[in-house]
Image: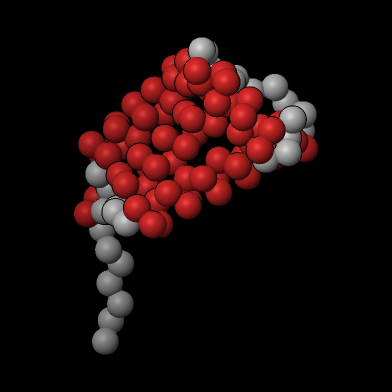
């Protein structure tokens, strides 16, 4: 039997690429408002669902573990200041940072 290589055009979804780019722009726009922790969690959750993961018991832990890992990497290890958000989001960000031991 001969092996056939799938055509790249059959697997590329231009619409999904545009939505992905718009999500990245929206993420950058929401960072100063919602803060890094909330924006990143939402971004990861939406990205997972958009990518085909539908089970909340998978999406939620992936988003939380990913966000906490990135917080530790950037704020804990690299000591980079990241946006905490405004108003209640600032308070929540401080709570998350204290709960994870970063602050």
Q: Is residue 74 visible?
A: no
Instruction: Using the rendered image of the protein, determine whether residue 35 is visible from the camera's viewpoint.
Output: yes
**Quadrant of the snapshot with the N terminus:** bottom left
Image-based side of 4 in relation to 38, left or right: left
Percent position of residue 5, x then y: 30, 67
Image coordinates for residue 23, horizontal then vertical, percent: 37, 29
At x 49%, y 30%, the residue is: 38
Q: Which residue ends up furthest to the bottom in the rendered image?
A: 1
In this view of the protein, which residue sits in the foreground, 6 or 52? 52
Q: At which x and y percent is residue 54?
A: 29, 54
Q: Extreme top residue here?
A: 87
- The C terminus is located in which quarter? top right
Q: Nearer the viewer, residue 21 or 78?
A: 78
Quadrant housing residue 7: bottom left
Q: Is residue 64 above or below residue 21?
A: below
Numbered label tally: 0
Looking at the picture, does residue 68 appear above or below residue 85? Answer: below
Residue 65, percent from left and from top: 55, 49
Q: Residue at horizontal 54%, vertical 31%?
A: 37
Q: Nearer the viewer, residue 93 or 47?
A: 93
Which quadrant holds residue 18? top left
Image vertical order of residue 69 relative to residue 32, above or below? below
Frontmost residue, 100 versus 48:
100
Query: What residue is at 62 percent from the left and 29 percent from the top?
Result: 95
Colour style of the rendered protein structure = secondary structure
């Amino acid at each position: 039997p001969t092996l056939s290589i799938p055509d790249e055009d059959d697997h590329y979804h231009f619409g999904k690429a545009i939505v992905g780019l718009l999500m990245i722009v929206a993420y950058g726009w929401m960072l100063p408002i919602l803060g890094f922790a909330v924006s990143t969690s939402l971004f990861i959750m939406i990205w997972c669902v958009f990518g085909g993961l539908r089970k909340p018991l998978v999406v939620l832990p992936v988003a939380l573990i990913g966000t906490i890992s990135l917080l530790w990497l950037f704020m804990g290890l690299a000591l980079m200041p990241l946006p905490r958000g405004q108003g209640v989001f600032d308070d929540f960000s401080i709570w998350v940072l204290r709960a994870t031991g970063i602050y």
